[in-house]
Image: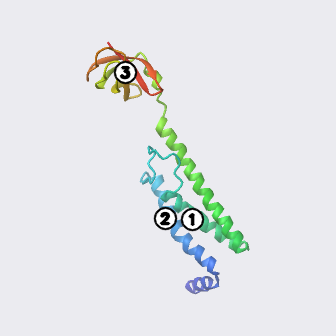
């Protein structure tokens, strides 16, 4: 009896209605699966939070969300008696809107992940260890390790007349260009 009702319902649908249901059902299942994975920590990112791409609009998650929102909005529009044109336009707008919102959330989260709360200026007057030798007289960058919110490995220059070799203990005296430390040997 139920199978007969579903068959009758399906046959009564317009081509657009059938198309929307064919899109909506699999993408809703994928969306549900994606949501469950996200809540239980099995989230497989399709956009690396530390990537150089600033704003990722076309991702797998966003496309799944687009088709889910597009399908359900389209079905709602058809059931409300909207015309085909209005239904498609509103469904497209809803799908694109959810993609934009999700991309903006991911972008905002990536900014938190990139910058965190580390303030490089907090390292001034701290001692550090040379990790990669630092050539003399600011001729090239080297690296130091300093304990500041855990251990940080940061670029460094020196005004000293001799190279600072790996393992040397140095004092951080200034920050140059917001991300390079100026150090001197202790």
Q: Position of residue 95 (x, y in %)?
A: 61, 61
On residue 76, the disc is none
Q: Is residue 68 left or right of residue 175?
A: right
Q: In the depicted view, which residue is nearer to us: 114 or 3?
A: 114
Label 3, secondary structure: give it.
loop
Front one among 182 and 78: 182
Q: Earlier in the sequence, mark 1 or mark 3?
A: 1
Q: Quadrant of the N terminus?
A: bottom right
Q: Secondary structure at mark 2?
A: helix
Which residue, given by chain and number where applicable, does mark 2 sit on?
A: 30
The residue tagged 1 is: 68
The quarter of the picture where residue 90 lies is: bottom right
Q: CA distance from mark 1 to mark 3?
A: 56 Å
Q: Residue at x 64, y 61 (%)?
A: 94
Can you identify the residue that label 3 sits on?
A: 138
Could you tell me residue 153's position as x and y percent? 36, 29
Viewer-nearest residue: 176 or 90:
176
Q: Residues within 10 Å of mark 3 (few under 14, many from 20)?
A: some
């Amino acid at each position: 009896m139920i199978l007969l009702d579903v068959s009758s319902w399906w046959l009564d649908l317009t081509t657009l209605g059938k198309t929307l249901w064919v899109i909506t059902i699999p993408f809703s299942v994928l969306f549900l699966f994606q949501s469950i994975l996200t809540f239980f920590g099995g989230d497989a990112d399709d956009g690396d939070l530390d990537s150089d791409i600033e704003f990722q609009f076309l991702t797998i998650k966003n496309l799944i969300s687009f088709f889910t929102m597009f399908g359900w909005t389209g079905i709602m529009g058809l059931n409300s008696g909207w015309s085909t044109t209005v239904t498609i336009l509103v469904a497209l707008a809803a799908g694109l809107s959810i993609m934009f919102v999700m991309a903006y959330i991911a972008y905002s989260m990536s900014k938190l992940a990139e910058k965190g709360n580390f303030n490089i200026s907090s390292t001034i007057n701290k001692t550090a260890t040379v990790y990669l030798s630092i050539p003399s007289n600011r001729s090239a960058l080297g690296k130091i390790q300093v304990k500041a919110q855990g251990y940080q490995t940061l670029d460094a220059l020196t005004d000293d007349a001799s190279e600072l070799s790996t393992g040397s203990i140095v004092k951080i005296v200034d920050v140059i260009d917001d991300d390079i430390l100026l150090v001197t040997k202790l």
